[in-house]
Image (tube, helix red, strand yellow):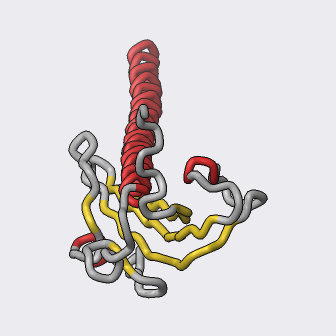
Amino acid sequence: MRMKRQQGVALLMSLVILLVLSLLAISGMQGSIMQERMASAQLDGFMALEVAETALGEVEDKLDGMSDLDGFGSSAGLYESDSGPDPYDNTTWETDASAAATSVDGITPRYFVEHMGTVVLDEEGQLPRDQGQYGENDQVKMDYVRIVVMAAGPSGQSRRLIESYYVFKPSGLEGVGEGG
């Protein structure tokens, strides 16, 4: 009789140990799922940042190619000083308050540019621009703008905003780099 009773205790102990091991396995799986979600969100954010940086370069190229500043205040995404929209307001990115840049991997970044004024630089100017590329070595009158770019990640769950201040001269780079 004593033998049957001991076998029942062994069965009960093995079931308790199995239950504890199952709980540990479930807890480990939940941790893995959480880590996978975090890695996915981080990748989504990195992709949005890369697309926003690409769009920023595109906007800078557009500014360098402008012949004048007549579009500011009248074209979508181009604003006069102190009239730019709030970058943290969703309607800025959902309406004509911003302009669309070229899509990258199915993500279409949006941007707006606010003209901040002009600045005169001499050859000792502290802004990172080589004045020689504009054909001038003394003083150069440059325009500067605030560029804000927004790109959402592929999942739509993340968003990255980049704000940059850019100094340029309309038509200043025409003919630069061309053989001739």
Q: Quadrant of residue 142?
A: bottom right
Residue 28 in the image: x percent, y percent? Answer: 45, 33
Counting the numbered discs, the total is 0
Q: Nearer the viewer, residue 76 or 96?
A: 76
Q: Residue furthest front?
A: 180
In-front residue for pair 83/44: 83
Query: The N terminus appears in which quarter of the rendering?
Result: top left
Residue placed furthest toward the top: 3
Could one spot residue 41 in this view of the protein? Answer: no
**Nearest the camera: 60 or 28?**
60
Residue 38 occupies which quadrant of the picture? top left
**Residue at 40%, 52% in the rendered image:** 61
Relative vertical location of residue 154 with respect to residue 11 in this rendering, above or below: below
Residue 101 image position (x, y, % from top left): 28, 56
| Residue 29 x/y as whole percent | 40, 34
**At 27% from the left edge and 81% from the top edge, which residue is drawn?**
74
Return the residue found at the far right.
124
Residue 117 visible at all? yes
Q: Quadrant of the C terminus?
A: top left
Task: Give the image location of residue 164, x and y in percent.
Answer: 53, 62
Q: Residue 34, relative to residue 165: is it above or below?
A: above
Residue at point 37%, 56% (across, down):
65
Does residue 95 appear to the left or right of 65 in the view shown?
left
Q: Residue at x 26, y 75 (%)?
A: 75
Front-most of residues 132 and 45:
132
Q: Quadrant of residue 77?
A: bottom left
